[in-house]
Image: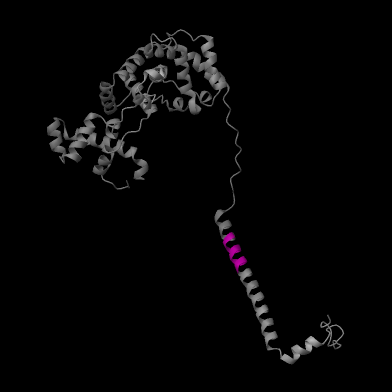
């Protein structure tokens, strides 16, 4: 259901929806009825419900009787009190959670800085890739343009001594 | 009427506050439980069931108490009687020997099923339901409804307005 739905649509939708059993709300309705704190519409609604539910009607009557004499009940035996207190005594106290101090910096500034930093990093990586690729391509081009004789001479000459390598080197078995 | 406030110390699980609460309202709770199970031998157990329910899930039920809507004694009586009745139903089912139960009934839930009602029945008064039904299901106008019910047209408008507020509040999350 979206905003702007007409009253008729809300009514039709409600008529097709089952009410969830909300015990807490039910108890407050009955107690409010017993104490006569409900507005006339809610009072009429709860009265209609009580007419169909005798147990709820008996609860209301008992609540009225008890509310009239709240101090008139005998005290609980100590054993019953101890048993009830055991429910809470063993309860683990909630952990004391220490909150981090709130971030005081300017969020927008931080976002801007992050954006420009990532752009600069991207440019640097692209430049490095371009340079590396260019260098490799250039070397490959130079080697491919080298005359076959120079290449052959390179194989014959010892690079350290510039002397001619013996022909039979590497061919011995 | 005095308005009893459930202390924050009690809701935070303070043992002394809980003991004070148990001592102050325990007698009333026992009396309420006795009202539901006058001949039951386990009044102490039923009373303990009420205390368990009150402090279960970090005092969820006790937190729902609203002093603006009812007195604490009234509310506790209602809670105690309802809890005792539920507990008795469960025990009654548990106490039946297995051989005595027809096989088909073994699938029955231990707690008596709650009557399912449609939302208007749970939220609106019979008068409000009647007026909305006449307006939107039978397409009557305000004057016709006022004549049919023998009330003032302004009363019809007012009832309609209050009813729609309740329904829209219920669907608030969906309506956005």
Q: Is residue B91 above or below residue B136?
A: above
Left or right relative to A6: residue B96: right
Where on the picture, by quarter, is residue A164? bottom right
Q: Which residues are magenta?
A: A114-122
Residue at (20, 40) in percent of width and height:
B136
Q: Which one is nearer the viewer's eye here, A3 or A126?
A: A126
Q: Which one is nearer the viewer's eye here, A135 or B58?
A: A135
Residue B6 appears in view: no
Q: Position of residue A65 (x, y in %)?
A: 35, 12
Q: Position of residue A130 (x, y in %)?
A: 63, 75
Is most of the magenta stretch helix, strand or loop? helix
Residue furthest to the front: A173
Q: Position of residue B87 (x, y in %)?
A: 41, 19
Left or right relative to B150: residue B72: right
Residue at (48, 21) in percent of width and height:
B52
Residue A42 appears in view: yes
Q: Which one is nearer the viewer's eye here, B145 or B137?
A: B137
Q: Is residue B14 above or below residue A99?
A: above
Where is the C terminus of chain A found, in terms of image quarters? bottom right
Queried whether the magenta region covers residue A45, the answer comes back as no
């Amino acid at each position: 259901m979206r905003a702007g739905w007409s009253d008729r649509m809300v009514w039709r939708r409600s008529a097709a929806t089952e009410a969830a059993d909300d015990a807490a709300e039910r108890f407050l309705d009955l107690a409010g009825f017993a104490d006569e704190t409900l507005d006339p519409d809610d009072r009429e609604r709860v009265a209609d419900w009580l007419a169909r539910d005798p147990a709820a009607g008996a609860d209301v009557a008992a609540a009225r009787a008890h509310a009239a004499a709240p101090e008139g009940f005998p005290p609980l035996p100590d054993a019953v009190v101890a048993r009830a207190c055991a429910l809470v005594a063993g309860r683990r106290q909630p952990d004391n959670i220490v909150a981090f101090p709130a971030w005081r910096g300017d969020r927008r500034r931080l976002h801007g800085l992050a954006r420009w930093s990532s752009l600069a990093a991207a440019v640097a990586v692209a430049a490095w890739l371009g340079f590396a690729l260019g260098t490799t391509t250039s070397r490959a081009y130079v080697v491919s343009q080298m005359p076959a004789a120079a290449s052959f001479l390179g194989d014959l000459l010892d690079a350290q001594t510039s002397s001619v390598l013996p022909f039979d080197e590497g061919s011995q078995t | 009427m005095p308005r009893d406030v459930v202390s924050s110390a009690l809701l935070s699980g303070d043992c002394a506050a809980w003991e004070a609460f148990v001592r102050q309202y325990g007698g009333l709770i026992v009396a309420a439980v006795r009202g539901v199970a006058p001949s039951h031998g386990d009044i102490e157990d039923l009373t303990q069931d009420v205390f368990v329910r009150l402090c279960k899930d970090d005092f969820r039920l006790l937190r729902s108490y609203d002093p603006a809507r009812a007195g604490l004694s009234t509310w506790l009586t209602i809670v105690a009687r309802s809890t005792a009745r539920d507990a008795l139903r469960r025990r009654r089912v548990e106490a039946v020997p297995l051989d005595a139960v027809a096989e088909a009934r073994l699938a029955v839930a231990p707690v008596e099923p709650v009557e399912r009602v449609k939302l208007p029945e749970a939220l609106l008064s019979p008068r409000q339901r009647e007026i909305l039904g006449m307006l939107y299901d039978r397409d009557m106008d305000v004057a016709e409804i006022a004549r049919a019910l023998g009330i003032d047209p302004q009363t019809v408008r007012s009832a309609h307005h209050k009813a729609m507020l309740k329904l829209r509040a219920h669907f608030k999350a969906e309506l956005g």
